[in-house]
Image: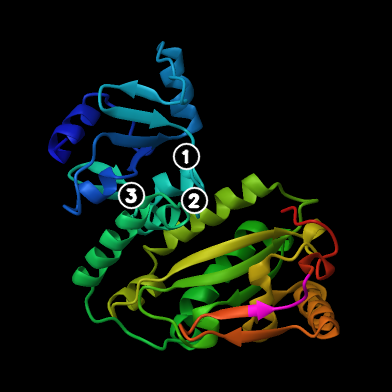
């Protein structure tokens, strides 16, 4: 179905602004990448409850279907961000909020269906064709003002609830591009604050950063950074995420209460060394870790974040 007809059907539902966003293939259709058979809409739990109270009954798959409009407060595939975050960060196109194309590419890249593999290729081709020359080989110094401002905001909002913060990824390696995320581990004291609450505060702060002088200064240079936080509770700090291994090589500690993060890195380095582990660079330029036949030897217990 043509995307303009799908949008017309969606607008008839009068969904409340800030409580929904278009997801799935319609995000491709609005950019002319390919047509969509229907229009998937993700909504907040609050709006979902209101729709149920209006006698909208989910079908056997769990969707509320109103003509070509499919509504849900969940998604069938893993996503990088939760639904409230994707809704809050959605792009307004023709008066309708659309989840960012990068988020659609991410979940489709995890699926093994032929149509999803084809969509990933179409998205990549589209992004390549619309990409302007962007800055390359950026390091922490490029982002220093923005990162410092983010830490300041976190200290004001959360204080001692934030235990440690570690920068890693392309920015820490000095290999960032203008479109790169600022990857950051944030350890929080779960005896003082719940994960859901700290996640809400951090996401809100990250969105607000886009209006800051520090962000706008970077944007003028075609640098559009998004801080991408990996939250780890203090009580589960020894349940190392696989990606935390990179922090032993390139991690830059931004904040560290009582050397908490430094000790974690030191202990993990000892375990890796004992196993004879190492990080290797692949021909593609990406890295992989060679550890032990049984990865659980590296862990204190099963991963549970």
Q: Secondary structure at mark 3?
A: helix
Quarter of image, res 207: bottom left
For the residue pair 249 and 34, the one nearer the viewer reads as: 34
**Residue 183 occupies which quadrant of the picture?**
bottom right
Query: Would residue 185 be found to the left or right of residue 5 on screen?
Result: right
Q: Position of residue 123 (x, y in %)?
A: 28, 60
- The answer to whether one can see residue 35 in this image is yes
- In the rendering, which numbered label is found on residue 93? none
| Residue linked to disc 2 | 79
Q: Which numbered mark, 2 or 3, is in the foreground of this view? A: 3
Residue 206, x across and y down, in percent: 48, 60
Query: Which circle marks residue 115 in the picture?
Result: 3
Question: At 78% from the left edge and 75% from the top edge, which residue is drawn?
Answer: 292
Mark 2 → mark 1, Cα distance in angstroms: 8 Å
Identify the residue at horizontal 23%, vertical 64% (top origin): 126
Q: CA distance from mark 1 to mark 3?
A: 17 Å
Q: Are marks 2 and 1 in contact (CB under 8 Å)?
A: yes
In the image, residue 163 sits, relative to residue 258, either above or below, namely: above
Mark positioned earlier in the residue sequence (1 or 3): 1
Label 3 crowding class (10 Å Cα cut-off): few <14, some 14-19, many 20+? few
At 48% across and 39% down in the image, what residue appears? 76
Q: Position of residue 66 (x, y in %)?
A: 30, 21
Could you classify mark 2 by the number of other residues whose Cα lies within 10 Å: few (under 14), some (14-19), or many (20 or more)? some
Q: Is residue 292 highlighted in magenta? A: yes
C-alpha gap between disc 2 and disc 3: 18 Å
């Amino acid at each position: 179905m043509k995307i303009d007809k799908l949008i017309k059907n969606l607008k008839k539902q009068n969904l409340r602004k800030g409580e929904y966003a278009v997801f799935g293939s319609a995000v491709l259709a609005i950019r002319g990448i390919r047509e969509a058979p229907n229009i998937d809409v993700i909504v907040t739990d609050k709006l979902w409850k209101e729709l149920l109270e209006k006698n909208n009954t989910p079908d056997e798959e769990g969707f509320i279907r109103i003509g070509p409009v499919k509504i849900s407060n969940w998604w069938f595939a893993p996503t990088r961000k939760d639904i409230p975050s994707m809704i809050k960060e959605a792009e307004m196109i023709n008066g309708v909020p659309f989840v960012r194309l990068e988020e659609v590419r991410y979940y489709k890249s995890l699926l093994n269906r032929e149509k999803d593999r084809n969509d990933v290729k179409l998205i990549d081709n589209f992004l390549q064709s619309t990409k302007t020359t962007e800055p390359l080989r950026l390091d922490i110094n490029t982002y220093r003002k923005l990162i410092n401002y983010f830490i300041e905001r976190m200290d004001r909002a959360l204080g001692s609830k934030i235990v440690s913060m570690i920068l890693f990824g392309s920015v820490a390696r000095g290999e960032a591009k203008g479109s790169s995320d600022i990857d950051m581990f944030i350890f929080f004291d779960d005896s003082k604050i719940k994960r859901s609450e700290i996640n809400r505060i951090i996401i809100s702060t990250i969105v607000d950063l886009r209006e800051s002088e520090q962000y706008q200064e970077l944007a003028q240079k075609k640098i559009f950074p998004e801080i991408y936080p990996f939250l780890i509770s203090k009580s589960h700090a020894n349940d190392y995420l696989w990606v935390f291994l990179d922090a032993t090589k390139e991690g830059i500690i931004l904040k560290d209460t009582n050397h908490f993060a430094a000790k974690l890195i030191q202990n993990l380095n000892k375990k890796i060394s004992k196993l004879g582990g190492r990080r290797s660079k692949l021909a593609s330029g990406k890295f992989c870790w060679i550890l032990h036949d049984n990865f659980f030897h590296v862990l204190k217990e099963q991963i549970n974040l």
